[in-house]
Image: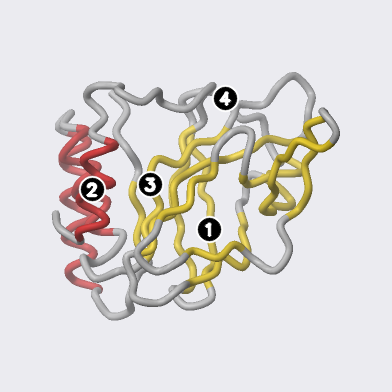
Amino acid sequence: MTVPSIARARPAGRGARMAGLALAAVFAFWAGDAAHAADAASKAAGSASAPILILDPWVRPTLGQVPSSAAYMIISNRGRAEDVLVSLATPASRKATLHESLMQGGVMRMRPVRGGLRIPAGKTVKLAPGGLHVMLMGLTRTLRPGETIALTLRFEKAGPVTVRVPVRKSARRAGDHGHGMGRDLDRAMRGSH
């Protein structure tokens, strides 16, 4: 069963609480309860007051010998101020940059996003095929469905947010049951658990 990934910006100084929640996540996963493992892991990744959340991240598998891939996600800013995604990094590639795809003269083109990606206060920004996305160039390994990679997003105000990104062939379809994506996004925007 796949559950949505949720990462939050982490405030400093929560050592014992983090260790306990991380242990709860490991135990729940070991016990075969993926839903509770994901909930415990998301609590270990941040506090209820964290302004930036990363929801439903995924990355495309490697196609043949192509040394690049693309990652997608929803970035939610629950804060009262705009934040800016300023850089990205992953051990899975030599370079990770934000790009956008756009139609020009009947041809789909891709270009880097300059100056960072603004995430308005109280809003979400979706990185999806055919639009904004994270380009992973110079892959250091083959990406296979079912694996995960670590991806760190650095924000101007929130700082670094690291998320585990599953490798899969396509986005979840709207209306997929059992994943709770809509419910998780609603709860994330309200700040409740």
> Between tags 2 and 1, which lies in front?
2
Tell me the number on the disc at residue 186.
2
Q: Amino acid at mark 2?
A: Asp
> Between tags 3 and 4, which lies in front?
3
In the picture provided, is 144 more to the left or to the right than 23? Answer: right
Question: Mark 2 or mark 4, which is nearer the start of the sequence?
Answer: 4
Image quarter (top left, top right, bottom left or bottom right) of the N terminus: top left
- Looking at the rendered structure, the secondary structure element under dot 3 is strand
Q: CA distance from mark 1 to mark 4?
A: 20 Å
User: Eyeballing the image, is 27 above or below 86?
Assistant: above
Tell me the number on the disc at residue 55.
3
Location of mark 1 (residue): 152
User: Eyeballing the image, is 173 above or below 35?
Assistant: above
Q: CA distance from mark 4 to mark 2?
A: 31 Å
- Looking at the rendered structure, the secondary structure element under dot 1 is strand
Residue 79's x, y, as percent?
A: 34, 71
Q: Amino acid at mark 4?
A: Arg
Residue drawn at x 30%, y 22% as measured from the top left: 176
> Between tags 1 and 4, which lies in front?
1
